[in-house]
Amino acid sequence: MTSALGAAGEVAIASLIERAPLASSLAQSFAAQGFRLALVGGPVRDALMGRLGNDLDFTTNAKPEETKRILKKWADNIWETGIEYGTVAGKRGDTTVEVTTYRSESYDPQSRKPEVIYGDNILGDLSRRDFTVNAMALELTSKIPEFIDPYNGLTDLAQKIIRTPTTAENSFSDDPLRMMRAARFASQLGFEIAPDVLQAMKDMAGRISIISAERVRDEFIKILMSTRPRIGITLLVETGLAEIVLPEIPKLRLEIDEHHHHKDVYEHSITVLEQAITLEDRLGGPNLIIRLAALLHDIGKPKTRSLIAGGGVSFHHHEIVGARLAKSRLKALRFDGETIDDVETLVALHLRFHGYGDGEWTDSAVRRYVRDAADLLIHLHVLTRADCTTRNLKKAERLAKVYDSLEARIDKLMEEEELSKIRPDLDGAQVMELLQIKPSAAVGKALDFLLELRLENGPLGQARATEELLTWWSKENSSPK
């Protein structure tokens, strides 16, 4: 049905047309071939919110091959990676479009892939959408564009409510990933989830286990990179979804008794994430690595928690255990190797600063700090500063000043010694020539020795490095084996 919204409907249509000028051009191409085309889903919602981007989604009664023929003439280039699901994409100028044939799809209870059935009208297509705010369309091939809103999505948009077009149970049974999408939209839009939808998420959380790790990962990233990740993460935890897709996070809710006090680790971790986000300008803007590291930095605490006689709690080596757990979880979620390595490194290093005290570190210790952080040094600066969540203002100020002094020392040494390029004073070829040896493990051992000297003493120069190397080599070869 076409929503009878009067003036509001007219404003909505005018806004959509104004914000998607290429939509009319594409619609004419489809209409010329006798097909219908409607802007649909997220772009309609975003246009109504005044935040439409350059990615537009459409639905049509044209079959995928027919869509492909039309897009080939209209777009600068096209791709058909989603054609088996009825979707063909194209790009014209700065605008990317995805055109999908009317469809309905559902999951077999044991299947990870949807069965796609093409439909013959837009109302059937809208009924299979995830949420009412994404089940609105602007039919563009009619003489006068029609705003179609069969499930009162505009009302829910105005009230900032996430609701499903059909029953939440049916919707989540068809595609369990929609439960995570509900948490994601709550994070991205600041909307509330309708009570019946929230209850269905709790009742059906176990169904998320049939969804592939890659799809779960992508939704989790969208939650984490949203403007309000706390909302989405809290929803994942409270509904039980996190128990399945990210169990280390709910485990942070450690019991606290009157005798053994410690910081609320779960709340601390979310706060560290939020504080890291406020410092992301140092990293050039929103940064997945720092957000993952901030959220996961203390996940080793549940496994290392130890009660201290007389009160108190310790978490010895939780950074090492946490680094291992972070690596394992990110692998399970199919993150790429570089991301996994970076997060593992940051989690492992996040406590290192606390050995700095009031600035007692030697230059050697500062060099090692920089060497171990390598390209992640600024990330480590951000994580370490974000990790201070004390309510004691004097303590917070003292920690900030101490870290200021560490950064100043790093900057000074950087300027004097190019710390970011710490290398032995001699290279492999020079080592082999001086020691008269061929490529072997001994060369690597010699370079390690020279690197340790460099870290301990700063730049030595080739003359002293040569002298130290020859002395070391003499001792190595005179020692009894």
Image (tube, rainbow, N blue to C red):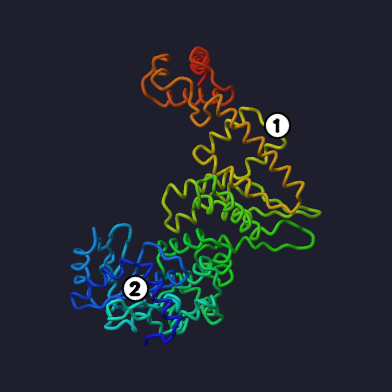
* Numbered marks: total: 2
For marks 1 and 2, give the CA distance.
63 Å
Given residues 25 and 369, the one toward you in this image is 25
Q: Mark 1 — residue?
A: 360
- Residue 383 in picture, x, y percent from top left: 59, 47
Q: Is 253 situated left or right of 134 in this image?
A: right
Q: Quadrant of residue 140?
A: bottom left
Q: Mark 2 — residue?
A: 39
Q: Under tag 1, what secondary structure?
A: loop
Q: Is 126 situated left or right of 375 in this image?
A: left
> Is 233 above or below relative to 118?
above
Label 1 or label 2, whichever comes before in sequence order: 2
Given residues 194 and 24, the one toward you in this image is 24
Q: Quadrant of residue 274?
A: bottom right
Task: Name the residue: 52% across, 62% down.
Answer: 246
> Is 152 above or below relative to 15?
below
Category of crowding for the residue at label 2, using alpha-carbon neighbours closer than 10 angstroms: few (below 14), some (14–19), many (at least 20): many
| Quadrant of the snapshot with the N terminus | bottom left
Residue type (three-letter) at the residue carrying disc 1: Glu
Task: Name the residue: 42% across, 76% down.
Answer: 12
